[in-house]
Amino acid sequence: MKRAITVLSIVVVMFIACILWYRWDSETNHGYTWGYWGQFNTISNSLAKLPGVTIIKFGCNADVTMEEFGFDIVTADGRQLKVWFDEKDPIRKLSGDALSKALLEKINK
C-alpha cells in the first residue's frame, strides 16, 4: 500500500510539474531558441540579421503548439511584405546559413 501511494504521489507531482512548465514556457516569450517559442525566435533572429530587412510587427496562432506565425517586414527597396510560416513549413526546421538562404528566397519571390 505504501508503495502504491508513493507511485501515485510521484505521478501527480510530475503531472503538475508538466502543466507548470508548459504554462511558463508558452505564456511569455523568453527569447530561447528551444521550447514553445523556439522556431519563432530562430526565424525572427535570422530575419533581423538579414541586411536590408526590418521587422515591423509579428503575429502568431498560439495554441497548444505554435501553429502558424509570421512577420510584416520592409525590405531595403521599400517593399512591405508579409512572411508567414505554417506548422508544416520546412523552413521552420532550418538554422544558420541554410535558414538565411531560405528566408532570402522566400522574400524575393
Image: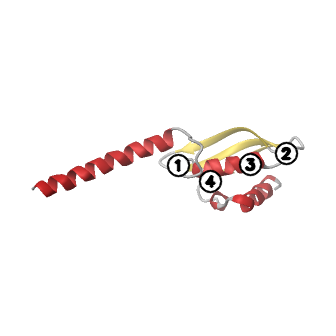
Where residue 59 appears, x then y in whole percent? 64, 40
**Mark 2 and mark 1: span between their CA atoms?**
28 Å
Report the amino acid beneath label 3. Answer: Leu
Q: Tell me if 69 is positioned left or right of 18 in this view.
A: right
Q: Tell me if 2 is positioned left or right of 25 in this view.
A: left
Depth order, front residue of 51/59: 51
Image mark for residue 52: 2
Q: Are marks 4 and 1 in contact (CB under 8 Å)?
A: no
Q: Nearer the viewer, mark 3 or mark 4?
A: 3
- Secondary structure beneath label 3: helix
Where residue 95 appears, x then y in whole percent? 67, 59
Mark 4 or mark 1: name the one nearer the start of the chain: 1
The residue tagged 3 is: 47
Where residue 67 appears, x then y in whole percent? 56, 50
**Mark 4 and mark 1: span between their CA atoms?**
15 Å
Crowd around label 2: few <14 · some 14–19 · many ≥20 (10 Å):
few
Mark 3 or mark 2: name the one nearer the start of the chain: 3
The residue tagged 4 is: 86
Mark 3 or mark 4: name the one nearer the start of the chain: 3
Mark 1 or mark 3: name the one nearer the start of the chain: 1
**Mark 3 and mark 2: span between their CA atoms?**
10 Å
Crowd around label 1: few <14 · some 14–19 · many ≥20 (10 Å):
many
- Secondary structure beneath label 1: loop
Q: Quadrant of the N terminus?
A: bottom left
**Mark 4 and mark 2: span between their CA atoms?**
24 Å
The residue tagged 1 is: 36
Q: Nearer the viewer, mark 4 or mark 2?
A: 2
**Mark 3 and mark 4: span between their CA atoms?**
16 Å
Report the amino acid beneath label 1. Answer: Tyr
Image mark for residue 63: none
Crowd around label 3: few <14 · some 14–19 · many ≥20 (10 Å):
many
- Secondary structure beneath label 4: loop
